[in-house]
Image (cartoon, rainbow, N blue to C red):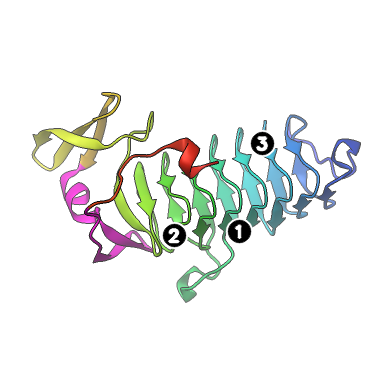
């Protein structure tokens, strides 16, 4: 059960506005500032100096590191990890996104110092490299990098390894991970081939193609998240 706990002494070194809904299993470290429209579900962790502005919902087991700013309307899915010094929802560059909710689905990992503009939709199991600026939607299992962010490749949800095609069937491709061997992830052939290496834009669209030749394609948590 979720209960509002604006006066809970457990959070006496944080500013939790009256009306915020905080599950008793959640952790709020000193220096955090939480808006009255915030909802923190089971086992959410907010490390020091996290600022939440406006209507923001964090689903169970979301982990937010130090000095992060979250601006609503924003919904972050279960099990997502956000590294320190990330900003989400602060800048809305497209008028069509002005009042649109930012959605980050389940089990995403967002690297140190990344920025995600408001109003975009990030699919589940997405990886965003440290220092990236995301100005558009990211498909499920996408790995985004650079400023502005491109869809660098599709990544294994278990280890972040490179997904490669091992079987074609009409308009569908089946992939497996070159690192851990996990398989079973299926994509539209058109999406798989047409989107990689292109700048990510709102409304599931793509911009120019950017060369990634010579890039290090590995995803290493200790490099991107710490």
Q: Which quarter of the figure is the C terminus placed in?
A: top right
- Residue on which disc 2 sits: 134
Q: Position of residue 201 (x, y in %)?
A: 36, 64
Q: Position of residue 222 (x, y in %)?
A: 49, 37
Mark 1 or mark 3: whose residue is earlier in sequence: 3
Element class at badge 3: loop
Q: Between label 1 and label 3, give the one nearer the viewer.
A: 3
Q: Is residue 153 magenta?
A: no
- Distance from disc 1 to disc 2, alpha carbons, whole Å, reads 17 Å
Count of number-bearing discs: 3
User: Dot 1: within a 10 Å radius of its alpha carbon, few (fewer than 14), some, or many (20 or more) residues?
Assistant: many
Element class at badge 1: loop
Give the residue displayed 21% in from the left and 47% down from the top.
192
Mark 1 or mark 2: whose residue is earlier in sequence: 1
| Residue 5 appears anywhere in the view | yes
Element class at badge 2: strand
User: Dot 2: within a 10 Å radius of its alpha carbon, few (fewer than 14), some, or many (20 or more) residues?
Assistant: many
- Residue on which disc 3 sits: 44
Pick the front one: 215 or 44 = 215
- Residue on which disc 1 sits: 73
Mark 3 or mark 2: whose residue is earlier in sequence: 3
- Distance from disc 1 to disc 3, alpha carbons, whole Å, reads 18 Å
């Amino acid at each position: 059960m979720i209960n509002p706990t604006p006066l809970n002494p457990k959070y006496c070194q944080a500013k939790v506005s009256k009306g915020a809904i905080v599950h008793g299993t959640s952790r709020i470290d000193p220096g955090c500032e939480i808006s009255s429209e915030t909802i923190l579900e089971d086992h959410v962790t907010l490390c020091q100096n996290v600022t939440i502005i406006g209507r923001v919902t964090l689903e169970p087991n979301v982990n937010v590191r130090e000095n992060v700013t979250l601006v609503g309307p924003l919904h972050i899915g279960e099990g997502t990890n956000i590294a320190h010094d990330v900003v989400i929802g602060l800048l809305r560059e497209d008028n069509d996104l002005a009042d649109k909710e930012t959605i980050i689905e389940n089990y995403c990992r967002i690297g140190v110092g990344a920025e995600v503009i408001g109003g975009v939709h990030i699919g589940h199991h997405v990886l965003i490299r440290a220092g990236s600026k995301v100005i558009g939607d990211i498909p499920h299992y996408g790995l985004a990098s650079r400023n502005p962010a491109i869809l660098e490749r599709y990544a294994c949800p278990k280890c972040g390894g490179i997904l490669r095609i091992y079987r074609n069937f009409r308009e569908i491709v089946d992939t497996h991970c070159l690192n851990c061997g996990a398989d079973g992830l299926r994509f539209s052939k058109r999406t798989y081939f047409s989107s990689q290496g292109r700048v990510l834009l709102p409304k599931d669209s793509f911009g120019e193609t950017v060369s990634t030749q010579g890039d290090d394609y590995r995803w290493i948590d200790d490099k991107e998240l710490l």
